[in-house]
Image (spheres, helix red, strand yellow):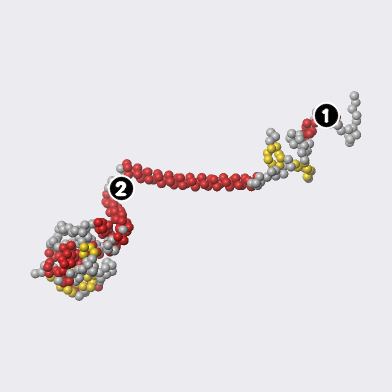
Amino acid sequence: MALSSNSGRNGRQPHDVRRFGSTNERDYTRNRPGRDLKGHSHQSTRRDGKYRSDHNYRTLTGHDTGYSLSGKRRGRSPLGGGGQRRELILAVVAIVALVVLILGISSCARGCSKGSDVTSDSVAASGTGNEADSRVSAGASSELTQKFTTALDSNEKLAKIARSAGDYSDKRLPELALLEPDAISFVASQPNASTKASSYDDEVKQGTYPQLLDWDSRWGNVSYAGSVLAVTGSGPTSLSIAYMGLTGKSDKTPADIASASTSAGYATDSDPFTSDDLFSKGTADLGLTCTGYTPSSDNLYSILSEGGSVVVVKLKKDFDSPYEHWAVVTALNDDNSVTLCDPTSKQASSHTWAMGTIAGNSEGFYALSVSQ
């Protein structure tokens, strides 16, 4: 049977697909604009010669990708578009990472600290530390260790004094610990120390004057002049220095002379300073002769150059101490300097002085010698 002719451009009628069908029908409908990959039709538009569709893209498996051809998603999420959501996710991830980093550093710091403690404890426990003093490195020599031990002990005691400074009966006691490092141990133990005096057993030689200090534990806590000898005893201690050097005897300690001074009225509880009378009058009972002089370099030189005498001087406050006190000039040296034994200051007694310096800072001179 012959087919009817077409009346199109090529002179042929187009096939009526509905009537005759076509072996290419599936391909034809698949490739037609406006149809999806499964062949279903949907609304499409043509712009600038290209078809655009509001339908979503689908994958090769047919699943909806969630993105339209125009780059806009139907049913927009409250979080905004894809780009905004990605930025938000990145920000959250960054915050979480920062928190984790901070926690990690903190944990490491605690771990390192524990590690250090464990290491120190392990060294101490293993016995590899300094056997003489665990506070000092094991590599330190015995001499250096001893120096550190002394300094560390003093610092600990000074800290103790500072904590209880307000509990001392006399403010000059904690102050003494600051002025005189060698007095720190005495001051630290003073509140609980015995008030009884001990004998002086050191060797004494005539012509040699011992460096006695007010805060010596053998007498420093004995009551005197409203306080204790450690801070008010410069008079008795100075006279004891002169007595021992001039006579070569040690039977008159600062505590013995303080007791005699109190009994004679040369010191009272209402006055923290020893009266001049202890020297001008009280020395006779010790077998000593006392002569008073006006303070001057000439008088100091004259007394000491004759030999056999010492000069007890009344030093002004703020010379080598915040307080007026007594001391002893014991010798004239070859360079015309003088040796000072100051019972309130070990440092002041550690070097020589110019005669003019001593004379200019004194308010009284008393020359002492052995009675003939």
Point 21% across, 59% down: residue:
195
Identify the mark at residue 364; answer none if there is no mark.
none
Q: Quadrant of residue 77?
A: top right
- Looking at the rendered structure, the kind of residue marked 1 is Gly
Residue 30 visible to an observer of this rendering: yes
x, y percent for residue 326: 21, 68
Identify the mark at residue 134; answer none if there is no mark.
2
Say which element carries label 1: loop
Point 44% across, 47% down: residue:
109
x, y percent for residue 159: 32, 56
Q: Spatial distance from mark 2 to mark 1, Cα to Cα?
A: 106 Å
Front in this rendered view, residue 79 or 202: 79
- Looking at the rendered structure, the kind of residue marked 2 is Ser
Task: Answer left or right for 46 relative to 326.
Answer: right
Identify the mark at residue 21; answer none if there is no mark.
1
Point 35% across, 42% down: residue:
122
Front in this rendered view, residue 92 or 319: 92
x, y percent for residue 253: 16, 62
Front in this rendered view, residue 310 or 42: 42
Q: Quadrant of residue 236?
A: bottom left
User: How many marks can you see?
Assistant: 2
Q: Which of the two labelled residues, at mark 2 and mark 1, occupies the earlier sequence position?
A: 1
Residue 354 visible to an observer of this rendering: no
